[in-house]
Image (cartoon, rainbow, N blue to C red):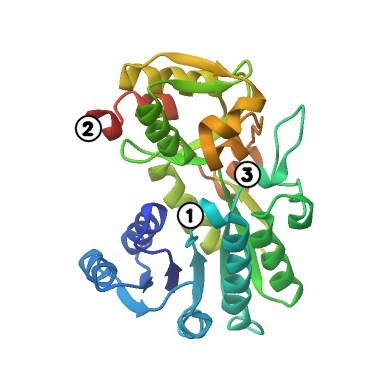
C-alpha cells in the first residue's frame, strides 16, 4: 500500500513510518519544514508538504494514497481545546478524500477519553463527548462521522507512549520536577495511567491499517495501569529530588496545565485488540524506561 502518514516526523509517526517501510509499504509523509522533509527522505519515504491546518494539503495527500494513518497533533497544551478542534477538521478533510472508496483511515486518540471509574476501559467503551469537558474526544467524533459516511475509519487509542527518550506526559512532569526541586503526586498517588512502549505502538498501527474494520477502536496498551506514585518515585530517583504529595487543590499551581490530568485514574485494557489483531506488546515497561531516561542524564 501507499500510505499517507501525518505526523510522520514526530515521536510516534517516525516509528510508524519505519514499521510500514520495513513491512513493504510505501510511505508518503506529511512535512511542514525542510528539516522534516530531509528526515523523511533519509528514512526512505516520499514527502508531501503541508500541515494540520492546511486542509487542502491533507485532502490531496489522502487522495494520492491507498490508506491514511493520522498521527499528527499539536501538543501546545496552552490551547488544548482549540488544538482538538483543529484535529477534528483535519480528520474530516482526510476522510472527505476517502469517501466512496474502501481505503482505510486510522485516527489517533487517547485511552483517557473513555474514563470508566472502578474498572478498566475497553475498546467497547465510547468516548465521553467533547462537549462535556473531554476535548480530545473530538478526534473520535470526527472518525465516527467519517465512518457513518462510508469511510473505513478506525481509531487507535494511545496511553503514555514511552522509550528512554520520551515518556508522554511524564516527560513534562520530569521538567516540572527539575524546575521545582521536588517530584510530586496528587493525593495518595494510587491513581493509574496505562502505558506502552514506542516499539510496540508502531506495529499496532500497521496491523490496524492492514485489517481496518470500519468503526473499530484499538487500544495500544502494554501496561494496564502504572500507579502514579511509582512514576513520581522513579522521577525522584532519577533527579535525586524529594518525592512529595500535593492536595488536589495544590495540583493546578504546582503542575500548571498538566494539573488537568493529575489525579485521574484511567487504567485501560488491550485484551480485545490483542485478540482481534494478534498484537502482543513485548517491550520494557514505563518504569524500566524511566530508570534509564535520557532526561536524567542532563
Circles 1 and 3, Cβ within 8 Å, touching? The answer is no
Q: Earlier in the sequence, mark 3 or mark 2?
A: 3
In the rendered image, the quadrant that contains the N terminus is bottom left
Q: Which callout, 1 or 3, points at the residue further toward the start of the chain?
A: 1
Which residue is drawn at the image coordinates 60% and 71% (left, top)?
A: 91
Calculate the distance from the C-alpha at mark 3 to the C-alpha at mark 2: 31 Å
Q: State the SS at label 1.
A: loop
User: Local crowd at mark 1 within 10 Å, few (<14), some, or many (≥20)?
Assistant: few
User: Which of the pair 222/263 is nearer the observer?
Assistant: 263
Say the numbered circle drawn on residue 75. 1
Q: Is residue 162 left or right of residue 298?
A: right
Could you classify mark 2 by the number of other residues whose Cα lies within 10 Å: few (under 14), some (14-19), or many (20 or more)?
few
How far across and how far down the image is residue 144, in percent? Answer: 72, 65
Which is closer to the viewer, label 1 or label 3? 1
Q: How far apart are the alpha carbons under marks 1 and 2?
A: 23 Å
Give residue 96's quadrant in the image. Answer: bottom right
Foreground mark, 3 or 2?
2
Could you give the CA–CA distance between mark 1 and mark 3, rounded to whole angstroms? Answer: 16 Å
Instruction: List x then y, in percent, for residue 215.
Output: 70, 62
Indicate the position of residue 290 as horizontal and vertical percent values: 37, 27
Q: Any mark on residue 117, and which?
A: none
Secondary element under disc 2, as helix, strand or loop, is loop
Q: Residue 298 carries which label?
A: 2
Residue hosting label 3: 111
Measured as percent of width and height from the top left, residue 286 is found at 43, 30
- The quarter of the image holding the C terminus is top left
Q: Is residue 83 left or right of residue 173?
A: right
Instruction: Check disc 3 and report its element: helix, strand or loop.
Output: helix
Q: Can residue 218 be seen in this view?
A: yes
Amino acid at each position: 500500500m501507499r500510505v499517507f502518514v501525518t505526523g510522520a516526523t514526530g515521536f510516534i509517526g517516525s516509528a510508524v513510518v519505519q514499521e510500514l517501510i520495513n513491512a513493504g509499504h510505501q510511505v508518503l509523509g506529511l512535512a511542514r519544514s525542510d528539516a522534516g522533509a530531509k528526515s523523511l527522505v533519509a528514512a526512505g519515504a516520499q514527502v508531501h508538504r503541508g500541515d494540520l491546518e492546511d486542509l487542502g494539503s491533507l485532502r490531496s495527500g489522502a487522495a494520492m494514497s491507498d490508506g491514511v494513518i493520522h498521527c499528527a497533533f499539536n501538543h501546545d497544551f496552552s490551547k488544548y481545546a482549540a488544538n482538538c478542534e483543529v484535529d477534528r477538521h483535519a480528520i474530516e478533510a482526510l476522510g472527505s478524500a476517502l469517501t466512496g472508496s474502501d481505503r482505510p483511515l486510522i485516527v489517533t486518540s487517547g485511552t483517557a477519553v473513555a474514563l470508566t471509574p472502578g474498572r478498566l476501559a475497553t475498546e467497547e467503551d465510547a468516548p465521553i463527548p467533547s462537549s462535556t469537558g473531554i476535548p480530545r474526544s473530538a478526534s473520535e467524533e470526527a472518525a465516527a462521522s467519517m465512518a457513518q459516511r462510508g469511510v473505513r475509519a478506525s481509531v487507535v487509542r494511545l496511553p503514555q507512549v514511552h522509550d528512554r527518550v520520551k515518556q508522554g506526559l511524564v516527560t513534562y512532569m520530569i521538567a516540572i520536577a527539575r524546575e521545582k526541586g521536588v517530584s510530586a503526586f496528587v493525593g495518595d498517588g494510587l491513581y493509574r495511567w496505562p502505558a506502552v512502549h514506542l516499539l510496540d505502538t508502531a506495529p499496532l498501527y500497521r496491523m490496524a491499517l492492514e485489517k481496518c474494520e470500519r468503526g473499530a477502536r484499538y487500544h495500544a496498551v502494554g501496561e494496564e495501569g502504572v500507579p502514579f506514585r511509582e512514576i513520581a518515585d522513579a522521577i525522584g530517583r532519577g533527579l535525586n529530588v524529594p518525592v512529595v504529595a500535593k492536595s488536589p487543590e495544590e495540583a493546578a499551581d504546582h503542575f500548571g496545565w498538566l494539573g488537568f490530568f493529575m489525579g485521574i485514574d484511567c487504567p485501560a485494557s488491550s485484551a480485545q485488540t490483542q485478540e482481534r489483531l494478534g498484537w502482543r506488546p513485548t517491550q520494557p515497561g514505563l518504569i524500566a524506561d524511566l530508570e534509564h531516561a535520557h532526561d536524567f542524564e542532563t
